[in-house]
Amino acid sequence: MDDIADAVGLNKATVYHYYASKSLILYDIYKRAADFTVAAVHDDPTASARETIYQFTRRLLIGIASNIEQAAVYFQEGPYITEWFTEDQVAYIRQAEAQVYEHIRDVIDRGIASGEFYECDSHVLALGYIGMTLGSYRWLRPHGRRTAEEIAVEFSTALLRGLIRDEKVRAETPLGVDPAELPGKPGAAPAR
């Protein structure tokens, strides 16, 4: 608690006024990260599956880049939450994680059902997608060589080119957006 108080520029008594224990601080970090991730993977059901996957990826990577420390705490402390949190707190986190998985799997299934995507094991692909995006906290740097938005384009393009059935769409507009509008492309619109 001394380290936390020093980091935020408060005395330890003030920190304890807001948080009775370190586990409550950790839960607050977890809850914010879980709520952000669930919100990031909500979609417009009228959008194509490919557009939705790209938007999920974009929102997730931009969010992770904006708070690398929160993402690192979330994943590094994950194995220990049953020791730190109450049963209700653990249930809240597990429910959020299940929602993220279900949203991603459902979008992949929607793409398969519509004929937009090739047949695949949506369960395995959803788990791989979660690892690909949420694990980026390990190496993603907000001021690195590539922006989070540019990396989202690369990740999404690679993934979607393996899923999209239509050869023309796969080659020309796998993300469902005009290529000139993508970050890092000549003549591209500024990042939003």
Image (tube, helix red, strand yellow):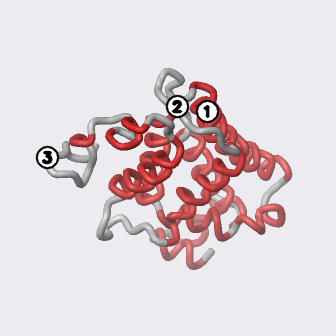
Q: Where does label 1 land, which residue?
A: 112
Q: Position of residue 134 (x, y in %)?
A: 56, 58
Q: Which mark is residue 116?
A: 2
**Which amino acid, by three-letter code, is at mark 3?**
Gly
**Which amino acid, by three-letter code, is at mark 1?**
Ile
- Mark 2 is surrounded, within 10 Å at the Cα level, by few (under 14), some (14 to 19) or many (20 or more) other residues, namely some
Residue 70 lies in what quarter of the image?
Answer: bottom right
Q: Work out which residue is located at the far top of the displayed protein and give it.
A: 46
Marks 2, 3: nearer the viewer: 2
Residue 96 lies in what quarter of the image?
Answer: top right
Q: Where does label 3 land, which residue?
A: 187
User: Horizontal placement of 2 versus 177: left or right?
Assistant: right
* Tag 1 secondary structure: helix
Quarter of the image for the C terminus: give it. Answer: top left
For the residues bearing labels 2 and 1, Cβ distance under 8 angstroms: yes
The residue at the point 47 percent across, 26 percent down is 47
- Mark 3 is surrounded, within 10 Å at the Cα level, by few (under 14), some (14 to 19) or many (20 or more) other residues, namely few
C-alpha span from label 2 to label 3: 29 Å
The residue at the point 37 percent across, 36 percent down is 168
